[in-house]
Image (tube, rainbow, N blue to C red):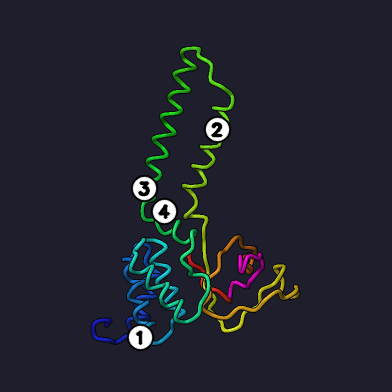
Amino acid sequence: MFKQKKFDEAASLYEKIITETPNFNPKVYLKLANIYENRGDFVMELYYLNLYSFRYADERVFEKIYTIATENGYKGYEKNDLNYFLYYFRQYSIYVWAGFLIIGIYVFAVFLIKRLNNQYSPIPHKILFLVYLVFLSVLINLPNNYRTAIIKNEQVYLRDYPSAASHIVGIISEGHRLNVINSEDIWYQVLWDGKFCYIKQSDILLIH
């Protein structure tokens, strides 16, 4: 259907595949992004490009996301240090983990050998090794804990507490991307313009 340019039927089929098929080809995201680009729906195009980019680091997709966001005035897609770090970390994470694990195993072996030989290991060295293990744990889990969201509605209120009765601290329009910090029922805590605030689940497209 996609090749026949029956985009509406193809989009319905692809979205059904994503919903019902556990192990689908991630290029489905790219096809859906192309369909929404043809429709002029840049928010949904960015959503599917982000879903693909979150799983597979592709510099062409990364650049396309940045270009679309820039042309439409969407914030949150800047080429900052955090976005670059996450992009390259996902791309080379297996090598990063392997390198740090090798270092950790080597240091642990040194401590073990010293203990077996009744040799003294300075307390600061042990503390540094524990800090290293904590850092390694955070690094390994970073891609799983880091989430972003794209605003899908035209006018969305940012609130200071997870309640519809709480004070409105800002208004944000569709297309902008935010960092998700935490979730609480139907509310998500996000970081926007350096401030923590809350937004309804129904107002965002969550990128897992």
- The N terminus, quarter of image: bottom left
Distance between the alpha carbons at the discs numbered 1 and 2? 54 Å
Tell which tag, 2 or 3, sits nearer the viewer. 2
Q: Is residue 36 magenta?
A: no
Q: Earlier in the sequence, mark 3 or mark 4?
A: 4
Q: Which mark is residue 94?
A: 3
Q: Position of residue 176 (x, y in %)?
A: 53, 75
As shown in the figure, which amino acid type bears the numbered disc 4?
A: Phe
> Disc 1 marks which residue?
38
Distance between the alpha carbons at the discs numbered 3 and 1? 36 Å
> Disc 4 marks which residue?
89
Name the secondary structure under disc 2: helix
Q: Earlier in the sequence, mark 2 or mark 3?
A: 3
Name the secondary structure under disc 3: helix
Q: Judge from the rendering whether residue 174 lies leftward or rightward of residue 194; answer left or right.
A: left
Q: Earlier in the sequence, mark 3 or mark 1?
A: 1
Q: Judge from the rendering whether residue 201 lies leftward or rightward of residue 39; answer left or right.
A: right
Distance between the alpha carbons at the discs numbered 3 and 4? 9 Å
Q: Are marks 1 and 4 in contact (CB under 8 Å)?
A: no
Tell which tag, 1 or 2, sits nearer the viewer. 2
Q: Residue at x 29, y 87 (%)?
A: 6
